[in-house]
Amino acid sequence: MFCRNLMRSGLILTIMCVMCWMSVPVAGATPDDDRLQELEREVAELRAAIEELRAAGLAEQRLAEIERRLEILAEEVENLKVGEASVTVSRDGEYSGLGPAASKVYAKEQGVSIGGYGEALLEFFDDEREDGVPADKTDRFDFLRAVFYFGYKFSDSWVFNSEIEYEHASTSNGGSVSVEFAYLDYLYRKQLNLRAGLVLLPMGWLNELHEPTVYLGAVRPQTERRIIPTTWRENGIGAYGVLGGFNYRTYVVNGLDASEFSAGGLRGGRQKGAKAKAEDFAWVGRLDYTAVPGLTAGLAGYFGDSGQDLEDAGGDSIPVGTSIFDLHVEYRYRGLELRGLWARAELDDIARLNEALGYEGVESVGETLEGGYLQAGFDVLAGRGKSSLTPYLRWEQINTQHEVPEGWSADPANDQEIFTLGLAYQPIEQLVFKAEYQSVGNQAETGVNQFNLSMGYIF
């Protein structure tokens, strides 16, 4: 056992050392402070010039062109202040709610757009649980997903966009092929655009922005897997846009399927657009404040029934009213990245649901589920070119049985606390390598710690 653990630790240490060696900046590299000051001065001068020209009566069409060029300069200033490697959404897709690869089609003038991403994960599990009992978990090396984006821009107003995902490398060995999203957009104006099809629900951080280069961590936080069941997509229709300093998205979608809920969370209730039961619908919306460079702060909510005509023994329907909401905040400044998320789900009719599904004892679906995390990272190479090297840490707490109905009990293993310490290296913005250690504990003392190594790419 000692030799095996030494091998694991040596492998992690070796890879971290290689990553650090690869990240050493070229001699003479200097920060972008001079360029930043120059741009800020140019922006200030242009703004003053525009006001003088407007007062002098220059044609509005000419002023509009000057203002457009000014915004390009202002954007570069913002990117330098926040840190160019931290810009996770392309300017052309900034209000579409998508990552850099997924939003490529919006930058096209017309025609086909192709992009994608992929990631592989190597997991080493400790031999013992936290209570000293053998863990009985097998180390895994998985090509998690290979994803392809296909889009088509018909005109300045009409856009089709889609994501096709291949999970776990082979459908003959537990893998699958799924449509993650496929929708049509009608681009009316920045303030109001329409969307219809299979859509990503705008909850949490990772459900929309799940490309591996845009978030810290080799594995996704449990809160965004079991309470916000990432990747969560449903058939629906809605609108999105920018109003002043606020970004919004709002959709009506088919509801979750409560017959697939479990003590472990809501993930099984996703219908994924596949012959989805549509007896119950839901509304989901998100509002983010983005007026301050580097800051995103907001909330999101999902409200609807999930019973989908499920009945109890007496033939009465079980609506299973479902409410999920989250508060989220992120701040980025140069190399610094701070992120927080808190999510809570509240479900009705759980005693009747448990009886209909035959759940007993600790098998109960939670009446309330709660989870959240705080995360911090700092790019030690910020301002020194395209490469980034970011140590990060995350504290997370989640309980999928925070409350259960009378007559059932909560499994203490579902009350978890997870500490993650890691390092992410991006030699260029499209590639990332991550190494992390996770300390996993729960109230049953059955948690198993693990080392994770991952690689990811976008194009």
Image (spheres, rainbow, N blue to C red):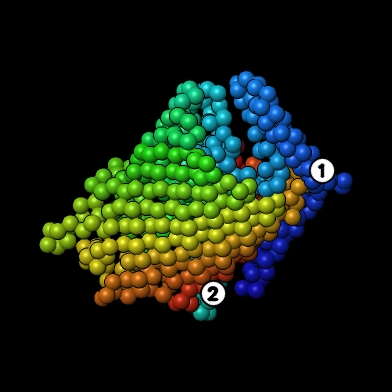
User: Relative to residue 161, is residue 367 depicted above or below?
Assistant: below
Query: Where residue 291 sits: x, y (%)?
Result: 58, 46
Mark 1 residue crowding within 10 angstroms, few (<14) / some (14–19) / many (20+): few
Residue 128: assigned label: 2
Query: Where residue 309 sits: x, y (%)?
Result: 20, 52
For disc 1, the marked residue is 34
Query: Residue at 51% across / 70% down in the picture?
Result: 417
Q: Which of 111 and 50 is in front in this view?
A: 50
Is the C terminus in the top left, top right, bottom left or bottom right quadrant?
top right
Q: Relative to residue 44, is residue 119 drawn left or right?
A: left
Q: Relative to residue 360, is residue 228 drawn left or right?
A: right
Query: Where residue 55 sits: x, y (%)?
Result: 66, 27
User: Relative to residue 253, is residue 412 depicted above or below?
Assistant: below
N-term mark: 2 or 1: 1
Circle 1: residue type: Asp
Q: Nearer the viewer, residue 416 or 209?
A: 209
Query: Residue at 22% across / 65% down in the picture?
Result: 352
Query: Residue at 54% across / 36% down in the picture?
Result: 93
Query: Residue at 59% across / 61% down in the picture?
Result: 375
Q: Quadrant of residue 402?
A: bottom left
Residue 432: assigned label: none
Query: Where residue 153 sits: x, y (%)?
Result: 49, 26
Work out which residue is located at the far left of the displayed protein and give it. Answer: 314
Q: How many labels does the image show?
A: 2
